[in-house]
Image: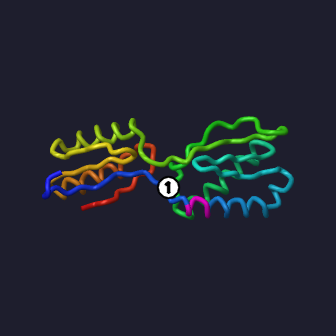
Amino acid sequence: MAATDSSFDIVSKVDLPELENALNQARKEVDNRFDFKGTGSRIESGKDTLTAYSADEFHLQSMLEVLETRLVRREVPLKAISWGMVTDGPKGTVKREASILQGIDTDKGREITKFVKKLDKKVNVTVQKDQVRVSSKSKDSLQTIMKAVKEHDFGLPLQFTNYR
């Protein structure tokens, strides 16, 4: 990158404290709501995973709606959580697992790179671990690229950092 180039990074990060706050609020609401009494409904969280348990699929879906409402209020993007299928849990319950998406994997990095290169051939795009760096001599073209990337759905929540 030359001294006159401007750049920014495209990243995909989840604000983990906000996610934990949303989980705690959802847990509290599920614990206190009458329609969840006796259903064994609960949400467990791991480092990069969530698991929701309930007595049946109806209560499980209701609990996930409560969680999604809390996530939206705490401004945690719903795209950051990838839910799997409903499976059988312990003692006749049902469960649903999810992974928390952090970072941009290699395939998504390539997809973003191709998309940006189609927009402007004069920009440099490099994939660095879990982020994509876009650099160019023209700040206007960088702003155009930012706008286009925001409007395109890559299936993950994207943020822009290190704009210089």
Let me know if residue 49 is in the magenta part: no
In the rendered image, the residue lying farthest to the right is 38
Secondary element at tag 1: loop
- Tell me the chief SS of the magenta region: helix
The percent coordinates of residue 47 (x first, y second) are 59, 50
- Vertical arrangement, residue 23 with respect to residue 105, above or below: below
Describe residue 115's horizontal placement relative to residue 121 as left or right: right
Was residue 20 drawn as part of the magenta stretch in this picture? yes
Residue 76, image x and y in percent? 53, 58
Residue at screen point 67% across, 62% down: 24
Above or below, 86 relative to 73:
above
In the image, the segment drawn in magenta is: 17-21
Residue identifier under label 1 = 14
Task: Name the residue at 45% across, 46% down.
Answer: 156
| Left or right, 86 with reference to 81 | right
Give amino acid for label 1: Val
Q: Against 150, is 17 above or below?
A: below
Residue at image point 26% right, 51% down: 145
Instruction: Rate crowding at label 1 as few (under 14), some (14 to 19) or many (20 or more) other CA atoms within 10 Å.
Output: many
Question: Which quadrant of the figure has residue 137?
Answer: bottom left
Drawn side of residue 5 relative to residue 149, left or right: left
Q: Quadrant of the C terminus?
A: bottom left
Query: Which percent across, then down, holds residue 17?
Result: 56, 63
Q: Position of residue 40 (x, y in %)?
A: 82, 50
132 and 143: which one is in front? 132
